[in-house]
Amino acid sequence: MKENDLFVTEFFLEEKIYRGFINLFGDKNPLHVDKEYAVQKGFRDKVVHGNILSGFLSFFIGECLPVKNVILVSQNMKYHKPMYINDKLRLNAIITGIFESVNIIEMKFKFLNQSDEKIASGNFQIGILQ
């Protein structure tokens, strides 16, 4: 892996992921579970929990990178637009820095929906385990 390497992964935000998040963490805020409430607040449907994206990032780091001896060190994420059940998401992640003296790789990322709207963006650092 080298600086400016770009990685692209796609995710489908299916109902079982949405339900699984609610079942695991119990977040039943009306914005997430009540369509009528969400519409009253200006959304087109129930808004899917933004932290599901952290799970997608975890999958990407652990399963999609060409090295497996990594651990997440830090993560920052900014949310730009809501997500909905059945959205198709694309994760673009680019290496922005490699710090060999401390075995750290830094990457910037963005999630885009099927309409190429930016859903979220941020950066993370991974440590390379020896």
Image: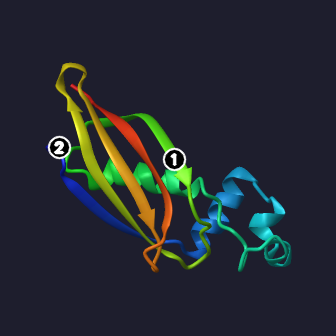
**Residue indicated by mark 1:** 77
Front residue of 16/36: it is 36
Q: Residue furthest top?
A: 101
Q: Residue furthest left?
A: 2
Front residue of 119/35: it is 119
Residue 21 placed where, x, y %? 64, 59
The residue at 77%/74% (across/down) is 42
Residue 114 placed where, x, y %? 45, 79
Q: Residues within 10 Å of mark 2 (few under 14, many from 20)?
A: few
Q: Is residue 81 above or below residue 102?
A: below
Amino acid at pointer 2: Glu
Front residue of 73/26: it is 73
Q: Is residue 30 above or below residue 102?
A: below
Circle 1 SS class:
strand
**Residue indicated by mark 2:** 3
Image quadrant occupied by the N terminus: top left
The residue at 33%/36% (across/down) is 126
State which tag comes first along the sequence, 2 or 1: 2
Picture disc at residue 66: none
Residue 90 appears left or right of 54: left
Residue 29 placed where, x, y %? 81, 59
Front residue of 129/80: it is 80
Tell me how many marks there are: 2
